[in-house]
Amino acid sequence: MDWGMKNRLSKIIRPETGRTVMLAVDHGYFLGPTTGLEEPGKTVAPLLQYADTLMLTRGVLRACIDPSVNVPIVLRVSGGTSILGNLADEGTTVSMRDALRMNVSGVALSIFVGSDLERKTLLALADLINEAQEYGVPVLAVTAVGKDMVRDARYLGLACRIAAELGAHIVKTYYCDDFEKVIKNCPVPIVIAGGKKIPEREALELSYNAIKRGASGVDMGRNIFQSDHPVAMIRSVREIVHNNMTADKAWDFFNMIVNEKKPAMA
Ligand code: R5P
């Protein structure tokens, strides 16, 4: 692996712990103005200092993020569909040249294993990896799941392994029962998405369980930015990811931060 690739990878997965807290705010690329991301710049501003990496699209990066900000970028480079259409029908939306111009640390693309467009998305991943290899840019493969697909270890294990076999450097998937099997069968680091907003305590448990079973971190969005206490949430997730904090302790930590911020009673 060349120096540039290793250097970029080390900006995504922190060498000190071998893990990452990736803040995902790319949802608008198919969901439009998702709750919490109406004004992405304002949403992420207080969170950036606690994120190892920021995952977003080219448009939001250019329009909403100050270029002097010190956070590595994982750029979503797939899209072209919306929640109203066939999500699997994505294409590559950003050239490697433009991604490099934005000084990204990695690029991300979704694959839709089991969909009618499986082959197209897998070959798009392979093409992206071929190009990214030329420039030393890590590729994050996002194992997207359709409405009809079961998120179990068999299916997610299949999708993760295929992404790794094609050469993805990191794979993003969902937590599931028997998650350790998904980890064991995938030779590259796996990060987990948070999925739809759930109560904070459950999201912390999800993060803890994933880390305990071998995840290399989280690529979490809605369970952070849709929380009433996004800073407390990302800080608590960070403790789990980098400091092996248990879910119970992280929940206490979350409440401590929330209570610290409450104005004193008159
Ligand atoms: C979905 O395809 C997007 O790539 C999100 O980045 C991903 O799902 C992680 O966000 P969340 O934790 O909200 O699921």
Image: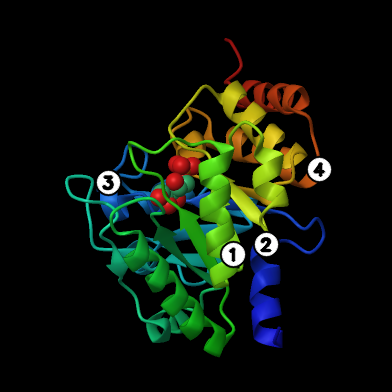
Q: Which mark is residue 188?
A: 2
Q: Do callouts 1 and 2 mark residues in contact (Cβ within 8 Å)?
A: yes
Please state the horizontal and vertical placement of residue 113, each as a whole percent of the image. 41, 54
Q: Is residue 25 visible?
A: no
N-term mark: 1 or 3: 3
Which quarter of the figure is the N terminus placed in?
bottom right
Inter-mark Cα distance, 4 to 1? 27 Å
In the rendered image of this protein, does residue 236 appear above or below residue 132?
A: above
N-term mark: 1 or 2: 1
Which quarter of the figure is the C terminus placed in?
top right
Give SS at disc 1.
helix
Query: Which one is in front, 224 or 262?
Result: 224
How many neighbours does mark 1 have within 10 angstroms: few (below 14), some (14-19), or many (20 or more)? many
Give SS at disc 2.
loop
Please state the horizontal and vertical placement of residue 112, each as a whole percent of the image. 38, 54
Q: Residue at x 62, y 31 (%)?
A: 177
Q: Which residue is mark 3?
A: 31
Mark 3 vs mark 4, foreground winner is 3
Please state the horizontal and vertical placement of residue 84, each as a whole percent of the image. 17, 45
N-term mark: 2 or 4: 2
Q: Which mark is residue 164?
A: 1
Q: Residue at x 31, y 51 (%)?
A: 28
Q: Do callouts 1 and 3 mark residues in contact (Cβ within 8 Å)?
A: no
Q: Is residue 180 visible?
A: yes
Inter-mark Cα distance, 1 to 3? 27 Å
Inter-mark Cα distance, 2 to 4? 21 Å
